Image (cartoon, rainbow, N blue to C red):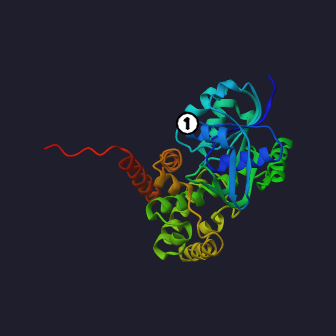
Amino acid sequence: MREVEFVILGAGAIGSIIGGHLARAGHEVVMLARGARATYLQKHGITITGLTEFTTAVKTLSDPGAIGHAGTLIIATKTPGTEAALEPLRRVQLRTALSIQNGPLKNELLTKAFGSERVLGALADTSGELLPGGEVLFTRNVSIYVGELDGTESARAQHIARTLDAAGVRASATTGIQTLEWSKFCGWVGLMALAVTARSPTWKYLTDPDSALLVARLVRETGVLARALGIRLSDRAVLPAATLCAATESEAVAIITRLGGEYRANTPAHRMSALQDLEAGRPLEVNETLGYACDRARELRLELPLLECFRRLIAAIDRTRREPFAPAPD
């Protein structure tokens, strides 16, 4: 069976942005999607608006078993249910797998499914939103970073990064992917937690002094976990994690409010994907992200009280929002 160049699991905003750009550039792409999204893509293709405007046809499958060989598998689903989603793909003969999901757990799940020799680290400083009509609004195109988990240079990471970049999704290879993934995760924890609880565009809670303080404290607590795991942080992330963790608290808050002003000026409509999920009634990424961090902290006997508080608060928001209302008995 002929090898498919790119298989993308997940046809939400980021998966569609990557798949659409690669398909438009002439690469063979298969999107794995289900339900109404699969039907839409089969009928209309991928439509991207915002930073760029185009529509392109793309092959879409609902059955992963229909794929025999693949060059690169890109995981672009939300984190809930990842392990189950990977199970039917274990039979695919593939050369490389990478995930642009949130949190560090993703690499452990990929390694378990495909073996460490096939797994690359990756993160996306890229944003978009799946619109009600099926189009995808492309709002942020900073970079997708790809690299070997052991920190070595590799031709495959450079090839994938060059291919994505040439297609129009900015990307680069790095030997410091673990540092970058954890640096992004530190910032993402703060941004996600306040997006779900404040329920506002990103710039609003970054410029508010109280919510900016909470973002700063969440970043710094997650940084404590990273340091305990021996992971160096960097400022090459959505938020400058290394500086936020090294600065005084007041300095960290000032940095965050300044960044909020930049969001207001440059991308005022930016909303975290977690807020999009909340408003659309989709499950929130809690256990696999905040929960993962809290579990690792307990293993190391670290106390991260604010992180634990938000983990439980957002889990409660998720459950009470999605579980059917049961009236009290008479």
Q: Label 1's element?
A: helix
Rendered location of residue 146, percent (x, y)? 75, 48
Would residue 323 appear left or right of 89 to someone viewing this image?
left
Rendered location of residue 196, percent (x, y)? 47, 59
Q: Which residue is mark 1?
A: 35
Q: Residue at coordinates 41% horizontally, 49% vertically from top-left?
A: 318
The one of 126 and 46 positioned closer to us in this rendering = 46
Q: Residue at coordinates 22% horizontally, 46% vertically from top-left?
A: 327
Tally of numbered discs: 1
Q: Residue at coordinates 52% horizontally, 66% vertically from top-left?
A: 215
**Quadrant of the snapshot with the C terminus:** top left
The residue under label 1 is which amino acid type?
A: Gly
Q: Is residue 151 visible?
A: no
The one of 35 and 12 positioned closer to us in this rendering = 35
Q: Residue at coordinates 69% horizontally, 43% vertically from top-left?
A: 45
Rendered location of residue 131, percent (x, y)? 58, 54
The one of 84 and 187 positioned closer to us in this rendering = 84
